[in-house]
Image (cartoon, helix red, strand yellow):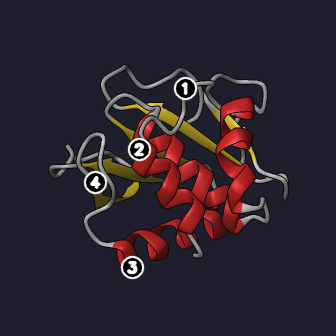
Amino acid sequence: MSETWNPAGAGVLRLPSGRLVRGRALRRPLPAGPRPDFAVHLLGKEPAEVPWESRWLRWPDFRLPSDGAAARDVLREALARAARERVEIACGGGRGRTGTALACLAVLDGVPADRSVEYVRRHYHRRAVETPWQRRYVLRFTG
């Protein structure tokens, strides 16, 4: 990876391990700077194609992933790849589903589940993880 995410850049979460993951809203234009090497799109319907490698995780707005095992697998992959690649997690608005997935990545990276939502709200977006069931999902997430 020749360029890295800007750790001070908007939407970039630094996990306790130092890995960087960018969260973003797909409804907004692609941010300036380097493109992701790998993206996870959290949407209720199949997303548009992108010129980098991506995975689609069926995850309707304000809900939870349709397939919990697939969610665990793709989030584990995203965390592993973030050690050497630019990884992006994205949904329509960039806060609810994206924040929930980022909180799950924080759990996988060693943040206790009962503190991971707070961690993501402090380091990514203050309104991340929008619904009570998304918070419960993070609390129960084991990866």
Label 3 to label 1, Cα distance in Å?
A: 26 Å
- Say whether disc 1 or disc 4 marks the residue closer to the N-terminus: 4
Q: Which quadrant is the C terminus positioned in?
A: bottom right
Tag 1 residue: 127
Give the x, y percent position of residue 98.
47, 42
Where 72 sits versus 13, above or below? Answer: below
Residue sitting at 59 percent across and 26 percent down? Answer: 33
Label 1 to label 2, Cα distance in Å?
A: 11 Å
Contact, CB < 8 Å: mark 1 with mark 4?
Answer: no
| Residue 3 visible | no
Where 125 sits versus 42, above or below? Answer: above
**Residue 105 falls in image quadrant:** bottom right
Tell me the tag on residue 59.
4
Residue sitting at 54 percent across and 33 percent down? Answer: 128
67 or 140: nearer the eye? 140
Label 1 neighbourhood size at 10 Å, few (<14), some (14-19), many (20+)?
A: some
- Say whether disc 3 or disc 1 marks the residue closer to the N-terminus: 3
| Residue 119 visible | yes
Q: Give amino acid for label 3.
A: Ala
Tag 3 residue: 69
Tag 2 residue: 97
Contact, CB < 8 Å: mark 1 with mark 2?
Answer: no
Contact, CB < 8 Å: mark 3 with mark 4?
Answer: no
Q: Give amino acid for label 4.
A: Trp
- Say whether disc 1 or disc 2 marks the residue closer to the N-terminus: 2
